């Protein structure tokens, strides 16, 4: 143990498998000559040959594959009980338990982590939190298990005990259980104690049904739709499910300011055109929803159009007006989609807008765009003279047109308008809009002529003079490109400062 041994002797005497050097180690003669002058068994001699600018580090992450570690393991296995090696204790891991009491007595071995070149040298000891640099301060460091234990900080853990707070069982609340059963058509008890039975599918229409529902929908299809609807369990998603059963086809009736206005005649003409185009497909029942706009939707001109369409095509028509403040519908969704698709595009003429409407929806069925001309706009307002009763209902009360929530026109009596003033009403009230005098010997019942409805416009509608002037200024300044000037030059200005807006909204 006390003989001086060179590095060459150590390498020659060790087997290749037990060599502490890595397989690709390649040391120069200058590096090996430094080791020949050092007594590896004398710790003082080792420290004296360490460069003055070297530092001794004690990190915790020395790899298990280090030659130094394998050397220590071999010494322990061979029964070496020198002060430099301490046996493992049950309280610590093998690396944590090998505490170096006399660190200077360990033979340093060249490795990828220790180099004996003239550059600064780092010696690494196992699981030691202290760092000493330079080497002259190494004698001031003492190591013991108690010091290592004190240096380790306690890891704080989140408090799992929430105290005396009670756990909330949200799904077991009575209101939540009641809502769950209602949305799924199950039996439930209301707040006032009334028991509501489970939803069951009713029998289909009899064979005498005019719409032949039993022939169009079999019992299996009806049961499947019924089960799918109640299995959704969410009110809003159930309405989406019903909407998905339809064609989901959107229609856009478009025109510019010189073609028509935006009043009841225009809206009635567009709806009448829609009915006229789709009635040939076998549709016999039309249901419309809209807001409560009096200038376009809830007025006598629209109701008269329903009477004429029901009488001409033998169809049933119902129109429901949504509650004020809750009028958002599929039409608003179409407008929002078109605005999003065109917000970053430069569109100058109505033709460009018509094209944008057609390509606004690309993932599903595109919108059907109908370019409205003056030949399509009919003057339904001129037929109001055929109606001689707008005020008195069937029970003699005054007709509350401003509070109507639903109107229904049926083919068997097209000039009788059924209505409701609240959605909770079970029965309809009605008003006979055409009260014909009784037939006598010299007077017969008059026939209502619903044909030959005249057109609302014969010539293009002039636009406001100031608006026309502004458009011409934009063309002169080339804000509007030249290729679009032809459309604007053909516009007809009005002599007055403001065009007639009496039939618009």
Image: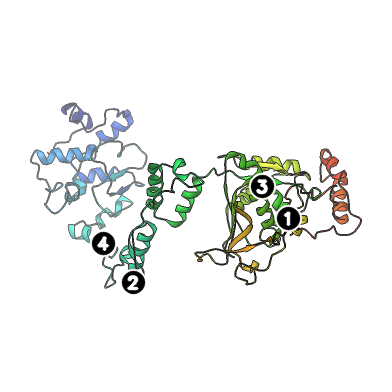
Q: CA distance from mark 2 to mark 4?
A: 58 Å
Colouring convention used in this rendered image of the protein: rainbow
In the image, taking residue 348 as reference, residue 21 lies left or right, namely left
- 4 or 3: mark nearer the eye: 3
Mark 4 or mark 3: whose residue is earlier in sequence: 4
Q: Which residue is mark 2?
A: 193
Secondary structure category for the residue under label 2:
loop
Mark 2 or mark 3: whose residue is earlier in sequence: 2
Secondary structure category for the residue under label 1:
loop
- 1 or 3: mark nearer the eye: 1
Q: How many marks?
A: 4
Please name whichever residue, 139 or 301, is drawn nearer the observer in this view of the structure.
Answer: 301
269 lies above or below 388: above
Indicate the position of residue 386 as horizontal and vertical percent values: 74, 58
- Residue 341 visible here: no
Indicate the position of residue 6 as horizontal and vertical percent values: 21, 32
Please tell me which residue is depicted at 64% across the width and 45% down the height of the picture: 313
């Amino acid at each position: 143990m006390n003989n001086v041994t060179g590095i060459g002797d150590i390498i020659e005497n060790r087997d290749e498998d037990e060599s502490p050097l890595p397989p690709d180690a390649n040391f120069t003669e200058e590096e090996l000559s430094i080791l020949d002058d050092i007594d590896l068994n004398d710790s003082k001699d080792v420290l004296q040959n360490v460069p003055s600018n070297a530092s001794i580090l004690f990190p915790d992450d020395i790899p298990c594959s280090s030659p130094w570690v394998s050397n220590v393991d071999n010494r322990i296995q061979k029964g070496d009980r020198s002060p430099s090696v301490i046996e493992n204790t049950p309280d610590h891991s093998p690396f944590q338990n090998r505490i170096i009491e006399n660190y200077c007595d360990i033979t340093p071995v060249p490795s990828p982590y220790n180099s004996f070149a003239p550059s600064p040298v780092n010696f690494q000891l196992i699981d030691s939190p202290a760092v000493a640099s330079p080497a002259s301060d190494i004698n001031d460091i003492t190591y013991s298990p108690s010091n290592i234990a004190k240096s380790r900080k306690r890891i704080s853990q989140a408090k799992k005990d929430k105290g005396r707070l009670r756990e909330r069982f949200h799904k077991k609340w009575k209101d939540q259980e009641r809502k769950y059963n209602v949305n799924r058509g199950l039996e439930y008890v209301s707040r006032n104690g009334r028991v509501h039975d489970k939803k069951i599918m009713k029998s289909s229409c009899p064979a005498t049904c005019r719409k032949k529902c039993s022939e169009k929908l079999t019992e299996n299809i009806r049961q499947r739709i019924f089960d799918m609807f109640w299995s959704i369990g969410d009110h809003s998603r159930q309405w989406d499910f019903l909407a998905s059963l339809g064609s989901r086809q959107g229609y856009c009736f478009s025109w510019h300011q010189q073609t028509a206005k935006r009043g009841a005649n225009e809206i009635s003409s567009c709806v009448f055109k829609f009915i006229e185009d789709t009635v040939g497909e076998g549709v016999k029942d039309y249901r419309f929803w809209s807001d409560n706009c009096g200038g376009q939707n809830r007025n006598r001109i629209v109701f008269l159009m329903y009477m004429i369409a029901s009488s001409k095509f033998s169809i049933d028509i119902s129109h429901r007006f949504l509650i004020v403040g809750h009028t958002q519908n599929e039409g608003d969704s179409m407008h929002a989609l078109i605005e999003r698709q065109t917000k970053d595009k430069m569109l100058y003429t109505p033709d460009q807008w018509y094209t944008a409407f057609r390509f606004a929806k690309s993932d599903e069925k595109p919108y059907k765009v109908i370019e409205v001309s003056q030949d399509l706009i009919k003057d339904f307002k001129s037929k109001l003279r055929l109606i001689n009763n707008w005020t008195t209902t069937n029970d003699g009360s005054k007709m509350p047109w401003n509070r109507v929530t639903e109107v229904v026109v049926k083919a068997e009596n097209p000039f009788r308008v059924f209505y409701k003033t609240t959605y909770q009403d079970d029965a309809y009230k009605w008003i006979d809009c055409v009260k014909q005098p009784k037939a006598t010997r010299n007077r017969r019942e008059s026939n209502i002529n619903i044909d030959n409805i005249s057109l609302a416009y014969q010539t293009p509608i002039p636009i406001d003079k100031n608006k026309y002037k502004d458009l011409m200024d934009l063309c002169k300044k080339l804000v509007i490109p030249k290729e679009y000037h032809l459309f604007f030059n053909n516009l007809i200005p009005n002599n007055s400062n403001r065009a007639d807006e009496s039939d618009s909204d």
